[in-house]
Amino acid sequence: MYVTPRPDAHEDPNFGIRLGLVGAMSFAAIPIIDPNMPSIVAALPVGLIGAQRKAFNLSSATAGPLTVIVVAWLMTALVEWLTPLPLVFIGVMWLLYFAGFLMILRTNSQAGMLIVVMTVLVSIMGMHGNARVEMLRDGFVQASLVALVIAPVVYFLVPAHTRAMHIADPQADGGDHVVAAVIRASVLLFVTFWLYSVMQPSDMMMAVIAAMVLVFPTRQTVYSEAWQRVRATAYGGALAAAILMCFTLSSQLPILLGLIFLAGLFLGQGMLYGRHPAMVYQYGFSVTLALVAGALSTQDPGYATFTRLVLTLTGALTAAFIVAILDALLVTPPPGRRIPQS
């Protein structure tokens, strides 16, 4: 799947400042709109805005949040319609997973990732009842609207040093895409039911960790993504613990927003200059925001961090291992390229 490249320090040297502002402004929106799922409102704008590169792109900043809103409404309506029919519900879930993975493998498009991730979240919440899935939908709508408002503001305050806009150029790999999509859809279906059995509804954003590692087309990239999630969760958990510890000394909103800004600045500089892939630091900031928002609402931060790590290690790595084995046994490699030995 297409991965956004590392931001260029010459073209956008203040990227870390902007990322910190996105986190602080997203968190500042929580007491204003009082969402039922504050973790989504805190973390989603970072994913939508932090993935942009170079100069501000109005079409990209608008299309991303609007797409999330439309998909959230469509998926919610579909799940509420199908939950009274369990077997049909399971079959449609698998078909949506298959369609999303096939889109990713054939085009390397991030739209397929959105389909997969949204299907995981909405379907799991749907198993807990329509009220839960509507709560999730409203959370995505609120977070997307926050991202729509914040994006032009942060780029106006901290513009890039280039007028060139980033143009994504995904390149699809060869190979047997249909079989690979069947493998990933089937594995993710089992992971979905495992998540439903062990996770509380308030923690369902953690399901993204397990789903995201399967959207990559080869064994090597699946393993790499799984380890990136582990590392990002550890970094995000450590920063969240530090922020909450400092916040207990002075429980004032400006203090909290300042701490979040500093965490975003630190991880944003890591995206520019760090030794790990840039997305490790971006994922880590999303984890930090989600944990802090959850801790200040209903979650125990220690429990949330531990659960994220356990989910990543047992869910994501196990799913990646199963996909790697099935790929080696069943997927035909592209012509002229041998599958490396694990």
Image: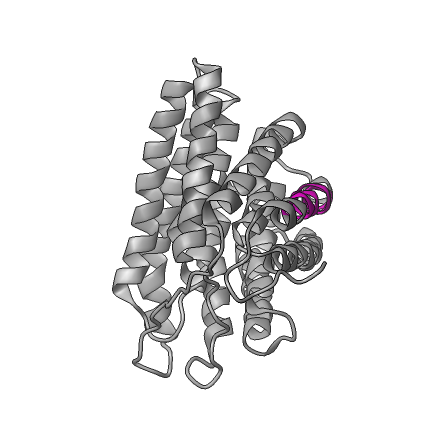
Q: Nearer the viewer, residue 46 or 102?
A: 102
Tell me, yes or no, if residue 45 can be seen here. no
Tell me, yes or no, if residue 216 can be seen here. yes
What residue is rendered at 35% in x and 61% in y?
151
Q: Nearer the viewer, residue 307 or 151?
A: 307
Residue 269's quadrant in the figure?
bottom right
Question: Does residue 93 sit above or below 283 in this rendering?
Answer: above
Q: Residue furthest front?
A: 336
In screen coordinates, is 250 left or right of 182?
A: right
Q: Nearer the viewer, residue 267 or 120?
A: 120
- Find residue 338 and report its horizontal and vertical position in percent: 60, 63
Q: What is the tally of numbered marks visible in this picture?
A: 0
What residue is rendered at 67% in x and 29% in y?
198
Query: Magenta stretch: residue 149 in it?
Result: no
Q: Residue furthest bottom?
A: 10
- Find residue 19 and report its horizontal and vertical position in percent: 48, 66
In screen coordinates, is 106 left or right of 59?
A: right
- Find residue 106 and report its horizontal and vertical position in percent: 41, 53
Q: How is the image coloured?
A: one colour
Query: Magenta stretch: residue 308 in it?
Result: yes
Q: Quadrant of the C terminus?
A: bottom right
In screen coordinates, is 233 left or right of 17?
A: right
- Find residue 39 and report its horizontal and vertical position in percent: 52, 44
Q: Residue furthest left?
A: 59
Question: Does residue 177 sit above or below 87 in this rendering?
Answer: below
Q: Main secondary structure of the magenta part?
A: helix
Residue 204's quadrant in the figure?
top right
Range of magenta residues: 305-323
What residue is rendered at 51% in x and 60% in y?
334
Residue 54's quadrant in the figure?
bottom left
